[in-house]
Amino acid sequence: MILEVGKLSVRPEAVDEFEDAYSKATHVLSSAAGHIDHKMHRSLDVPGHYLLIAQWETLEAHMVGFRQSELFHQWRGIIGPYFAEAPDVEHYEVID
Amino acid sequence: MILEVGKLSVRPEAVDEFEDAYSKATHVLSSAAGHIDHKMHRSLDVPGHYLLIAQWETLEAHMVGFRQSELFHQWRGIIGPYFAEAPDVEHYEVID
């Protein structure tokens, strides 16, 4: 299992629309092969900052299986219009 | 419950020492009042990048109860010497 951690920056005037869009897009991510679970988090420090933490079976399941699929275009098509800038995505493995 | 998410940048030549230090310091964090759980993660993309995800009962439990305590000085004293730069810490609440 690996973690995808994406820092998202949403235009502050569009946070309500973003959260509504996310509620409509979350099932797209859930339906990807190799997807285990994901949660979206709202920053308590900076308005418009969000953190997506997704668990995938492997790095390839995210970067190849999902990112190169039609599902990724659906997902980004629904939530992407509210981004202020490109997401900052990094992958991790648990060491503890 | 809130999340503390800390992006840590460790000097690449010191990653083994950092991981060893973390294994010795993890109990310090666990013993803080209001601490629920935490996990350390190693980046699969950038050598020396780590992500600490800690669950706290409240924001205040982290920022006041822990950060202003002697435990914080113990924690940072053990893992801090391996940092390449100051950690980037942000707090979140789950929205999904």
Image (tube, coloured by chain):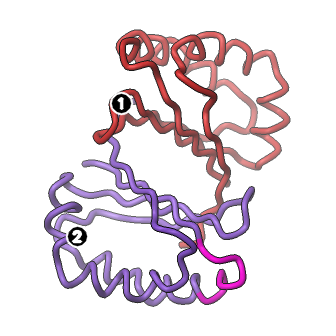
Chain colours: A purple, B red
Secondary structure mostly seen in the magenta stretch: helix
Disc 1 marks a residue whose amino acid type is Ile
Q: Residues within 10 Å of mark 1 (few under 14, many from 20)?
A: few
Q: State whether discs 1 and 2 lie on one chain.
A: yes
Magenta-colored span: A10-17
Q: Which mark is residue A67?
A: 2
| Residue A62 pos. (x, y %) | 23, 62
* Residue B13 sits in quarter: top left
Quadrant position of the N terminus of chain B in the picture: bottom right
Mark 2 or mark 1, which is nearer the start of the sequence?
2
Left or right: residue B25 compared with residue B91 = left
Left or right: residue A20 compared with residue A64 = right
Write the residue at 46% across / 67% down.
Answer: A86
Q: CA distance from mark 1 to mark 2?
A: 25 Å
Contact flag, marks 1 and 2 (Cβ < 8 Å): no
Write the residue at 75% across / 32% down.
Answer: B33
Q: Is residue A64 above or below residue A32?
A: above
